[in-house]
Amino acid sequence: MKKRIFAVSLLSTLMLAACGGGGGGSAGSSNPGAPVGSNPAPTPAPTPEPVAQTALQTSVPAPSYQAGSTTLSAFMTLNAARQAYGIGLRAQHEKIDVAAQNHAKYMLYHWGVGDFANAAHQEDKIKPGFTGEGVTQRMAFAGYYAGPAGEALSIAIEVDGVKSDPGVFAIDGLLAAPYHRFGLLDSTRDVGLADASGRFPGEGGVNHMFVVNYGTRDGVPAQLPATNWFGMWPVPDAVEVNFAFSGETPDPIPVNKGACAGYPVSFQVHTSLALTVSAFTLVESLSGAPISVQLSTPQIDANPIQARHNTAYIIPYRPLKLGTKYTARFVGTSGPTAIDKTWSFTTEAKNTRMMRGCTPG
């Protein structure tokens, strides 16, 4: 499956504890109408909901997203990743869908009129389509009262003549970006998805504003793996892994000055434990040739506010090779426990993703 050339990813995570769509995309045009919801009235007090179990959600109800929709493909792609990671599934929540759709429409409208500052996470209460300044307020406006909550955005152009699935592209791109990755793979239980699309002059295709909202209802415990769990991404023995990383906001590798980097490799432990790093390396499996990488730890990160006490990642300074097996090794500690883990993954055999024109290594 070919993918779009242009993509921007934006992240917002609001967690009260540890750091961490509804329907198909709405049809857009070169002059989309302002979304509904301007200047919402105060929301009523929430009605308490039953407290869920703390066990991982190994199954969730079938989503109501329309067959063949971008939101359905995004939902399936996200939960497949979470299942492989061993972190538990997310259930569709229609009220979060509403919040996501409201914000996607808000972004699309303001992008279409050239108000690009309002095509990000925050909404301005004096602007058309306002339903809440941040993700938790927008969820509350839709009737979902979150404890921990987060939002990830993907803005991409589906280039004319290039076959793609915006839902798969959005999740793939967000998982390729380390800050977004840890949000999509966190301990929250519910998710809402939206894709608002429109065609604007000079862009050469359909612009998609894809919104991923996620959270856990206030008072409901997180779903957490066992304390001896390790999360490695790409997962061991993964194939068809992206060879490149084309960036996110905030930028985790500013030394590259916007140039394409290699696919980030990450390691994560249980949220109750602190991670320390002695070594984190990547080599070509066949030759043993070392790959030059930037290491980010809980103590050293290009954006300290995004650093998490239980995660570490490396980003190759240059894109990886196509159809090549790589081996990662992590050495460190998780709380009092020593860790020495080695695993491998293989990059995609063909340059099918075309992310910002990144050239394989």
Image (tube, rainbow, N blue to C red):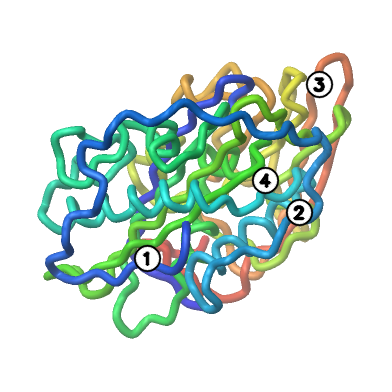
- Real-space CA distance between mark 3 and mark 1, rounded to the nearest whole angstrom: 38 Å
Residue that numbered label 4 is attached to: 290
| Depicted 306 relative to depicted 288: above or below | above
Q: Which mark is residue 271?
A: none
Is 221 located above or below residue 318 in the figure?
Answer: above
Say whether residue 143 is left or right of residue 60: left
Mark 2 and mark 3 lie on one chain; the one further toward the N terminus is: 2
In-front residue for pair 73/161: 73
Q: Amino acid at mark 3?
A: Thr
Of residues 116 and 29, the one drawn nearer to the viewer in this rendering: 29
Question: Which tag, 2 or 1, sits closer to the chain's start?
Answer: 2
Disc number for residue 83 = 2
- Residue 149 screen position, x and y as percent: 53, 33
Foreground disc of the pair 2, 1? 2
- Please, what secondary structure does the residue beneath circle 2 have? helix
Q: Amino acid at mark 1?
A: Gly
Q: Eyeballing the image, is 221 above or below 119? A: above
| SS for callout 3 | strand
Q: Quadrant of residue 203?
A: bottom left
Q: Provide the secondary structure element on which disc 4 rests.
A: loop
Residue marked by disc 1: 357
Q: Residue at position x 26%, y 37% from top?
A: 40
Q: Quadrant of residue 166?
A: bottom left
Instruction: Look at mark 3 in the image and give the residue it sits on.
Output: 333
Tell me how far mark 4 sits from mark 2, CA to CA.
Answer: 30 Å
